[in-house]
Amino acid sequence: MLHDRVLVSQDGEDGERRSSAGIVIPATAAMGRRLAWARVVAVGANVRTVETGDRVLFDPEDKAEVEVRSETYVLLRERDLHAVASERIGDGQTGLYL
């Protein structure tokens, strides 16, 4: 990975979803703009805020997909990440940071 690039693997599937009440929402249902979670697979040398294995929040409309060894990944710039769900939590921290 070069510079400030982050390679992520998307969580979940694009198929049917369930609401909190258990109602099935078909994959073809129109939705507003929605952010997606992904797991960081690799980071470039100039990435400062995330590490491999972190979960990050990004806008799936601004993604560039790449296939590596028959696996599909998303290539992003570090500045395109909206939040990081970190397991590296210190005292007084919530675990989510922007």
Image (tube, rainbow, N blue to C red):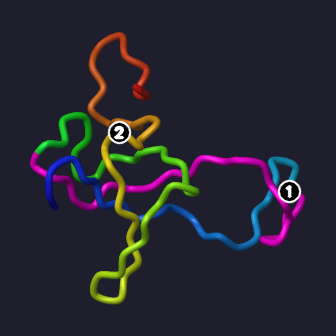
Residue density around tag 1, few if under 14, some if 14–19, many if 20 or more, within 10 Å: few
Residue under circle 2? 79
In front: label 2 or label 1: 2
Q: In the structure shown, which secondary structural element does the residue marked by tag 1 occupy?
A: loop
Which of the pair 24/9 is nearer the observer?
9
- Expressed as whole percent of the image width and height from the top left, the position of residue 51 reads 22, 45
The C terminus, quarter of image: top left
**Viewer-proximal residue among 32 and 51:** 32
Residue type at numbered disc 2: Arg
Q: Quadrant of the N terminus?
A: bottom left
* Residue 14's disc number: none
**Placement of 51 over or under 98, stated as above or below:** below
Above/below status of 13 relative to 46: below
Q: CA distance from mark 2 to mark 1?
A: 35 Å
In what element is the residue under mark 2? helix
Q: Is residue 38 magenta?
A: yes
Q: Residue furthest top?
A: 92
Marks 2 and 1, the one that precedes in the sequence: 1
Q: Which is more toward the observer, 67 or 9?
A: 67
The residue under the point 36% across, 55% down is 76
Q: Which residue is mark 1?
A: 22
Task: Locate residue 5, reporting x and y percent.
Answer: 25, 53
Give neighbour class at mark 2: few <14, some 14-19, many 20+ (Cα, 10 Å): few
Q: Are marks 2 and 1 in contact (CB under 8 Å)?
A: no
Q: Position of residue 64 (x, y in %)?
A: 43, 66
Observer-nearest residue: 84 or 60? Answer: 60
Residue displayed at 87% across by 49% down: 21
Q: Which residues are magenta?
A: 23-45
